[in-house]
Image (cartoon, coloured by chain):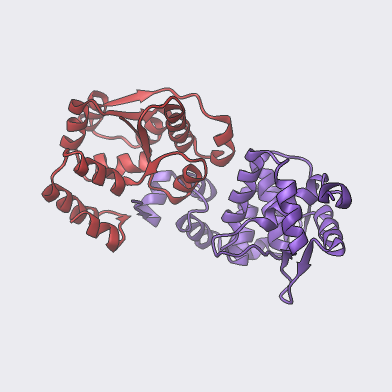
Chain colours: A red, B purple
Amino acid sequence: MKIIFDSSSLILLIEKLGLRQPFRNCKRRGIELVIPQAVWAEFTEKDNDAELLTFIGEIFDIIGVQVSPELEAFFKDDSGELEVSSVTKQFQDQGIECFSVIDEKYGARVCENNVIKTHGSIGLLLYLKNEGLITSKELTAIGQKIKSTNFRIKKEHLDLLK
Amino acid sequence: MSYIEDYGLDSFVRSRLLILLGLVDTRGQKEAGILKINKELRYFQYLTDEKNIEFSPFNLGDVSDDIRENVDELVECGLIDQKPDGSFFLTEDGEEAEKEVSKDIPTKEKKALAFSKEQLNDLSTDELLGLMYFLLPHTAVHSTEIKRIEKKKEDLVKSLYHKGKISANTAGKWLNLSKRDIIDNFGLELAA
């Protein structure tokens, strides 16, 4: 399994919520966590602390991506989402089990229209729980913590994390 | 009988008009007024870089005489009709013609038409104009509305972003902010 991340999900999960162990568990399980280079550039626009960058370097694969011409039209201003959707599509076309993590509605809509498997951060957290990589208790705590950020969560989604 | 031969539906504009009016939008409706049709086909042109429809900047931004003429001709042919509110829709014959035409249109174009309709169908008039003016500034050179729209720019960009019509990057570009600034200032609703 490969999971490909957009920058907004990294900002929420790694930077704001400080999640580390669930991703270490993924790596241990052989789940590949992928960050396209354009996403990495967006994420590192802000000076993040050394611990965070070292953690990402150890756990995530930062890869160069050949963008898909059919997706370029939809992402003329969004090299990050273009690379996420392109690489996910390429993995899918190769028969590799994968999904992308995109929270922005626009990017998620483009992926849906192009039959690219995509979840938001909530979907990712539920996947981690189903795979036994995070406990129910941890998930509930994460849901509460999200409420203190500027990321908004619908009540029905918050209920899913309980 | 072939609709394509009988009604000249091998024309680029006519065939795309039929496809567009055959698509169901997010409100479950197919019909559209002439302003929406113009903007949807202009957005389609932006996505595909097609140059087969000629647009000129006018009072409300880019419009096409080609589109207006072909809409009128399709009405005369009985393939589309107009409701009392001014919106156009496919007649029964139009639905059949659309099915025939659809077979010859590349999938990439049909996807772009569907996305264009989905992008614009649930916008208010100001959101619609804002999206097109900010995306394609040269189309607003003769606009009578641009000054009013510019005054509401931040609100319109915020609303377009929250509706998922533009990304945080695009919103940032239009407001001279970074993606992080947009997420920090406007928030981001998490998806499942």
Residue B48 in the image, given as x and y percentages of width and height: 66, 40
Say above or below: A35 vs B66.
Answer: above
- Image-quadrant location for residue B108: top right
Residue B71 in the image, given as x and y percentages of width and height: 81, 59
Residue A134 in the image, given as x and y percentages of width and height: 16, 41
Say above or below: B121 vs B9.
Answer: below
- Image-quadrant location for residue B75: bottom right
Left or right placement of residue A79 versus residue A134 in this view:
right
**Residue ranking furthest to the bottom:** B84
Residue A66 in the image, given as x and y percentages of width and height: 50, 24
Asked whether A22 or A147 is in front, the reply is: A22
Left or right placement of residue B176 versus residue B128 in this view:
left
Residue A113: tell me if it is visible: yes
Q: Residue visible at 86% across and 52% down?
A: B7
Q: What quarter of the picture does the N terminus of chain A occupy? A: top left
Asked whether B40 or B93 is in front, the reply is: B93
**Residue ranking furthest to the front:** B1
Say above or below: A102 vs A145.
Answer: above
Q: Residue visible at 77% across and 40% down?
A: B51
Say above or below: B25 vs A32.
Answer: below
Asked whether A32 or B163 is in front, the reply is: A32
Residue B141: tell me if it is visible: no
